[in-house]
Image (spheres, rainbow, N blue to C red):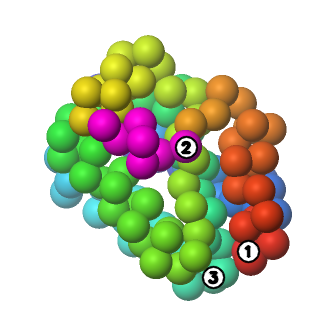
Amino acid sequence: MSFTYSIHNQTPIAAIITLEGNLMEKYEATDLLEDVDSQIDNGCIHFILDFSQLKFLSSSGLGVILSILTRSRKNSGDVVLMNVTEKLKSLLTITRLDHVFATAENLADALNSFGDNSTQN
């Protein structure tokens, strides 16, 4: 299964990006990173990455997720990972990225993760 994504601006706080399939290589996410840059240019600095449809994430895929985090934080935003499967939680733990990314079980928890920073959007 190839990698696809969709961006939803369903909240005034953050853009929700649903990742689907297998994110194996950085080149597969070129459009995603460009769309993240466009969102930031339009004032949306917070992102919720919905992993519910993501089947596999390689080390290059982790690099893509870190790129989104870096771009967001450079603009005083943040990223929350939502619906992270046990397999992906294990990967985050092994790579110690569980200390870098906030995770949430659902949209309400993800939005609450932004706290007072959400007013900057």
Q: Residue at x 25, y 52 (%)?
A: 63
Is there a contact, CB below 8 Å, between mark 2 and mark 1? no
Earlier in the chain: of badge 2 and badge 1, it is: 2
Which labelled disc corresponds to residue 121?
Answer: 1
Q: Which residues are magenta?
A: 96-102
Please, what is the three-letter code of the amino acid marked with disc 1? Asn
Q: Percent x, y for residue 85?
A: 47, 20
Label 2 Cα crowd, 10 Å radius (few <14 / some 14-19 / many 20+): some
Q: Percent x, y for residue 94?
A: 26, 27
Residue of label 2: 102
Residue of label 3: 42
Label 1 Cα crowd, 10 Å radius (few <14 / some 14-19 / many 20+): some
Asked whether, in this view, residue 7 is left or right of residue 114, the answer is left
Magenta stretch encompasses residue 114? no
Q: Residue at x 39, y 67 (%)?
A: 70
Asked whether, in this view, residue 13 is left or right of residue 86, the answer is right
Earlier in the chain: of badge 1 and badge 3, it is: 3
Residue at the extreme top: 86
Q: Percent x, y for residue 19?
A: 46, 40
Closer mark to the observer between disc 3 and disc 2: 2
